[in-house]
């Protein structure tokens, strides 16, 4: 029982990290960035390349090295996200929503198959695997590496939340999300703020990618597809555009999946997750913490 | 839906389709000839004639198989065009309906020994139900939710087909009976069915319902204010798309005599979308040409296998940035001014 809860929370923290980027981008320009899951994939591969370049590592140094790689990767995927927005999305900001969505699909496609062309179609084995010392916590088997990854994820989320709620930057982001025109009139550089939002969201996705690579040990070019869908589900459960809600949604989806897998069997896990998504969209499309938004014409 | 600039997505983006004086913006000569050719009413019949004559040029089993697949792909694109092109709803899991059709007919014909044609009523019922189940909760919401839910739906269908015993698991079903005696007659049957489907989709697009679809696409709120029941109208588009996809699936099963989950990945959905976007959303001729190009191009570019999907992705972005109306846009008469 507590094992299921722990597994759920662990996977959920990945979902939450990826979902945050989705949610932030959606909150600020109302775009579902389909390529977001692929930035996660990109992060895993960047981490893979950096670790490979670093050569052999002793087991004792694995964790600090991994954290370093994490920072580096976050920078790279963040910049990739900014570039993506600049090239593919910015010019279409005033265009019909359909064009923007199709562009996002195109970007996702280009990233996936670009990576396939660059790194090959076969899964790659991650060069670093954290050796796990197993601990017993309330009857659940927890490895030290899992704890570390969850701690990193939680720290990142707390950092993001502080940034958005306390800093000047975050206030500007919230202002643009509320009303871009009024924000521009108040002297906020809307383009720059949107770029920074993409940077933050993509950096978080990249961090999740490296962590997933180190945890599961295998990465491939399609790994972002499913997690993109799951992250969206998590964002919808919590309330898309709402940061604490999205974190909650990620953890909740992880838990639901963990229990769903236990009851229905692993092969139905994804079907179960999407079933939950459709249920939520029917019953409470604004999510658990989302506010009711009236569309203005 | 929120900004004033979003009102007329396809209308303002069709300079070539405008009357003659404006057509000469980038050099009058070739442009206007091209656009006159494009607006020629015989273009559709010419395309059909090409399809009918193609086996006389090259009738090797490989060529026939490729051409049959291309024809089925045209039908898929025509169906997706109803949803994306006419009604402006982005469906990213369109291949799911294709799978539903192929599996329903395949399972019924192999397990119960029914001839394929007798499974059609069941296929229609099942695809309509699938369309209603996915459409009902999502069509009330913003269009982007629909996009991602359909993406999830595509995965659900594929995963379900992989996991169930009745669908043969990962290896799928095989031994599906054909519809006709040989590959040549099957090709002609396919071309005939697809031609009817394409014309049907075009007529539907010009009907009262089709006008309502375009109204919803251009401005859903205005449509609602004018008394269009937007939910019902969107549902009609979605279900029509589902039927087109399901019937194409039956042809697919009959063509390959086997279906497996590997044929129904997101890649396939994206390729159909690519065909619609490249050809011109809402323009039936453009969509047909787009589908033929997208389905035949990989056969010609086999050596570049690694890069062609990258190119497709980049092309999607470029088309949206540079020429959102597609290569062969809808005729001016169809585009509201």
Image: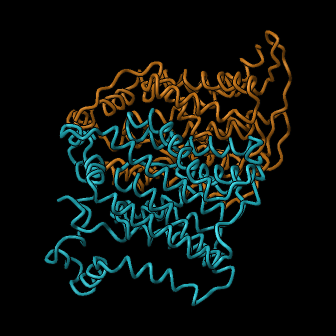
Chain colours: A orange, B cyan
Q: Is residue A37 left or right of residue A68?
A: left
Residue in front for this viewpoint, A256 or B81: B81
Instruction: Give above or below for A278 relative to B291.
Output: above
- Residue A244 vs A205, above or below: the answer is above
Q: Is residue B74 visible?
A: yes
Q: Residue furthest toward the bottom?
A: B57
Residue nearest the viewer, comparing A118 with A23: A23
Front residue of A118 and B209: B209
Residue at 49 percent across and 50 percent down: it is B242
- Where residue A135 sits, quadrant-wise, is top right
Residue A175 horizontal/vertical position (percent): 31, 29
Q: Quadrant of the N terminus of chain B?
A: top left
Examine the rendering and report whether any part of residue A79 can be seen. Answer: no
Q: State which quadrant residue B156 falls in.
A: top right
Q: Position of residue B110 (x, y in %)?
A: 74, 54
As rendered, which of A190 and B251 lies closer to the eye?
Answer: B251
Q: Is residue B108 left or right of residue B328?
A: right
Looking at the picture, does residue B184 appear above or below residue A71? below
Total marks drawn? 0
What residue appears at the point 61 percent right and 52 percent down from the top-left corner?
B99
Furthest-left residue in this view: B21
Residue A7's spot in the image, x, y percent? 73, 23
Is residue B83 positioned above or below B36 on the image? Answer: above
Percent coordinates x, y for residue B102 in the rendering? 63, 54
**Quarter where residue A255 is shown:** top right
B238 left or right of B108 in image: left
Q: Residue at x 45, y 57 (%)?
A: B79
């Amino acid at each position: 029982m507590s094992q299921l809860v722990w597994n759920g929370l662990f996977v959920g923290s990945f979902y939450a990290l990826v979902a945050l980027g989705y949610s932030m981008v959606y909150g600020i320009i109302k775009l579902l960035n389909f390529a977001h899951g692929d930035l996660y994939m990109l992060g895993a591969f960047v981490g893979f390349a950096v670790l490979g370049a670093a050569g052999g590592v002793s087991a004792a140094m694995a964790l600090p090295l991994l954290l370093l790689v994490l920072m580096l990767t976050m920078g790279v995927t963040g910049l990739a996200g900014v570039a993506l927005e600049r090239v593919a999305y910015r010019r279409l900001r005033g265009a019909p929503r359909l064009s923007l969505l199709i562009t996002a699909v195109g970007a996702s496609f280009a990233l996936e198959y670009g990576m396939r062309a660059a790194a090959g179609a076969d899964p790659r084995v991650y060069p670093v695997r954290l050796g796990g010392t197993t601990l017993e916590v309330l009857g659940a088997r927890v490895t030290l590496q899992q704890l570390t990854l969850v701690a990193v994820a939680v720290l990142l989320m707390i950092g993001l939340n502080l940034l958005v709620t306390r800093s000047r930057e975050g206030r500007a982001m919230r202002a643009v999300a509320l009303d871009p025109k009024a924000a521009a009139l108040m002297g906020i550089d809307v383009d720059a703020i949107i770029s920074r939002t993409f940077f933050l969201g993509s950096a978080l996705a990249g961090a999740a990618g490296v962590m997933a690579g180190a945890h599961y040990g295998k990465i491939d070019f399609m790994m972002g597809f499913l997690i993109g869908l799951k992250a969206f589900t998590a964002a919808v459960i919590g309330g898309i555009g709402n940061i604490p809600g999205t974190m909650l949604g990620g953890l909740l989806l992880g838990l639901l999946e963990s229990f769903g897998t236990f009851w229905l069997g692993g092969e139905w896990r994804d079907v179960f997750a999407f079933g939950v998504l459709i249920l939520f969209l029917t019953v409470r499309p604004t999510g658990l913490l989302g506010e009711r938004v009236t569309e203005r014409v | 839906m929120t900004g004033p600039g979003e009102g007329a997505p396809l209308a303002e983006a069709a300079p070539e389709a405008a009357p003659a004086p404006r057509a000469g913006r980038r050099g009058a000569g070739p442009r206007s000839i091209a656009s006159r050719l494009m607006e020629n009413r015989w273009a559709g019949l010419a395309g059909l004639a090409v399809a009918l004559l193609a086996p006389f040029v090259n009738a090797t089993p490989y060529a026939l198989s490729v051409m049959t697949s291309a024809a089925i792909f045209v039908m898929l694109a025509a169906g997706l065009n109803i949803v994306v092109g006419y009604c402006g709803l982005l469906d990213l899991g369109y291949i799911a309906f294709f799978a539903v059709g192929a599996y329903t007919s395949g399972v019924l014909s192999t397990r119960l020994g029914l001839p394929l044609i007798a499974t059609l009523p069941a296929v229609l019922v099942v695809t309509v139900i699938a369309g209603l189940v996915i459409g009902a909760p999502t069509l009330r919401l913003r269009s982007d939710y629909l996009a991602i839910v359909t993406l999830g739906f595509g995965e659900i269908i594929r995963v379900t087909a992989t996991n169930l015993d009745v669908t043969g698991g990962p290896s799928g079903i095989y031994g599906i009976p054909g519809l006709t005696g040989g590959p040549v007659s099957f090709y002609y049957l396919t071309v005939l069915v697809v031609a009817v489907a394409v014309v049907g989709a075009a007529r539907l697009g010009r009907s009262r319902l089709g006008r309502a679809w375009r109204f919803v696409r251009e401005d859903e709120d205005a449509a609602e204010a004018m008394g269009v029941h937007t939910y019902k109208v969107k549902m009609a588009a979605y279900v029509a798309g589902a039927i087109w996809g399901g019937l194409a699936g039956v042809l697919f099963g009959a063509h390959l005599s086997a279906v497996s989950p590997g044929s129904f990945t997101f890649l396939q959905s994206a390729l159909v979308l690519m065909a619609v976007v490249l050809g011109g959303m809402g323009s039936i001729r453009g969509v047909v040409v787009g589908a033929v190009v997208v389905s035949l191009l990989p056969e010609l570019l086999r050596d570049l296998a690694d890069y062609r999907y990258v190119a497709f992705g980049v092309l999607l972005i470029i088309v949206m940035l540079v020429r959102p109306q597609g290569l062969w846009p809808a005729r001016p008469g169809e585009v509201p001014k």
